[in-house]
Amino acid sequence: MTTDEKNWGMYCHLAAFAGLLIPFGNVIGPLVIWLLKKDEYPHVDMEGKESLNFQITVSIAVMVAGALSVVLIGIPLLIAIVVFTLIFIIKAIMETNEGRSYRYPYNLRLIK
């Protein structure tokens, strides 16, 4: 695996932080990188799908927790989702930076 391929795989996970700047950027960022580089690098294809699936899963969880915040249980759920998402993304970035693949726990694998 080349350094370029390893870096683009890491960027797939790093792009999820775009959600801090724009709505649904956490999905759009990994999607753009995956679409641009999936045919060029097999590792990026695998990491891009993994990151994209995780960000879709997180988006669904945030919407459900947001709806549950009306009855106040959603607020602690939102906090937990944010904390665990940050931990998993940082772990994925570190793993892919070393050239290893990362599989998120609790991930709906919608894109195969």
Image (cartoon, rainbow, N blue to C red):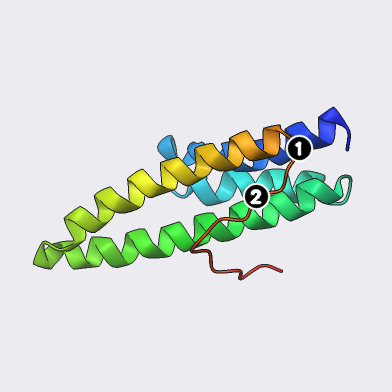
- Answer above or below: position of 21 versus 71: above
Taking the image as shown, residue 23 lies to the left or right of residue 91, namely left
Q: Secondary structure at mark 1?
A: loop
Could you tell me residue 22's position as x and y percent? 44, 40
Residue 101: horizontal and vertical position, in percent?
Answer: 71, 48
Q: Going 51% across and 37% down the picture, which residue do you hit? A: 90
Q: Judging from the image, what secondary structure is the residue with disc 2 in?
A: loop
Q: Is residue 97 above or below residue 82?
A: above
Question: Looking at the figure, which quarter contains the N terminus?
Answer: top right
The x and y percentages for residue 95 are: 64, 39
Query: Residue drawn 49% across and 37% down?
Result: 17
Is 83 on the left-hand or right-hand side of 48? Answer: left
Q: Amino acid at mark 1?
A: Gly
Mark 1 and mark 2 residues within 8 Å of each other at the beta carbon? no
In the image, what residue occupies the spot 11% across and 61% down? 72
Tell me which residue sits at (64%, 56%) in the image.
50
Outermost residue, left side: 71
| Residue type highlighted by circle 2 | Tyr
Residue on which disc 1 sits = 99
- Residue 66 in the image, given as x and y percentages of width and height: 25, 60
The residue tagged 2 is 102
Spatial CA distance of label 1 from label 2 is 9 Å
Please state which of residues 62 and 35 is positioned toward the viewer in this rendering. Answer: 62
- 62 displayed left or right of 68: right
State the image quarter where residue 4 is shown: top right
